[in-house]
Structures are given as C-alpha cells and as structure tokens.
Image (cartoon, rainbow, N blue to C red):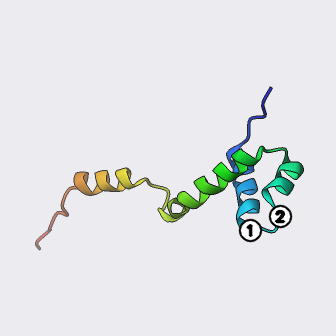
Amino acid sequence: MRKKWSDSEKARIALMAIREERTISEIDQETGAHPNMISKWKRDLLDNADSAFRNGKSENERDLEKKCTPPPICQHS
C-alpha cells in the first residue's frame, strides 16, 4: 500500500529539494518519497509560489468580487 502524503509533508520535502543541500536521492532515502514525486512536488511548489501572496483568495474570487461589488452610496447632508 502506498503512503498518502499530506500537503505539509509534500511542502517540507519540496523545500528540502529546493534548498539543494542534499541530492534528490538523499532526500528519497531520508523521507521514503520517490525521486519522481520529490521532483514533481518541487516543480509544483515553484510554479505556484506566487499564490502564497494572494491574501487567501483565488484570482477568480477577486475578479468576481470586483464585478459584484455595488458602487458606494453617496450621502448628501
């Protein structure tokens, strides 16, 4: 039976690969993650790094908010 890796485990292992302090083979031996998976997680993390700075909302959610937000109501006194 294959191990189910949590998102935090994948991130930790991908960061190990990004740091390049150890080879993929060394990370494989240390963690038990297959080298192909380590490379994929590293690539996924690098490809999606910008999403960490999006205030928790997807681009589609922000676009939808812009379209659906009513204009401010002006109050004259």
Tell which of 23 and 12 is nearer to you. 23
Q: Quadrant of the N terminus?
A: top right
Image coordinates for residue 29, horizontal then vertical, percent:
88, 49
10 Å crowding of disc 2: few (<14), some (14-19), many (20+): few
Residue 40 placement, left or right of 52: right
Q: Quadrant of the C terminus?
A: bottom left
Tell which of 8 and 25 is nearer to you. 25
Pick out the residue farthest to the left. 76
Q: Could you tell me the amino acid type at mark 1?
A: Arg
Do residues under tags 2 and 1 come within 8 Å of each other at their CB atoms?
yes
Residue 48 placement, left or right of 2: left
Q: Nearer the viewer, mark 2 or mark 1?
A: 2
**Which of the numbered marks, if any, corresponds to residue 19?**
1
Image coordinates for residue 42, horizontal then vertical, percent:
66, 56
Q: Is residue 44 above or below residue 77?
A: above
CA distance separating discs 2 and 1: 8 Å
Q: Could you tell me the amino acid type at mark 2?
A: Arg
What residue would you read off at disc 2?
Answer: 22
Residue 50 placement, left or right of 23: left
Residue at 14% x, 68% y: name it.
75
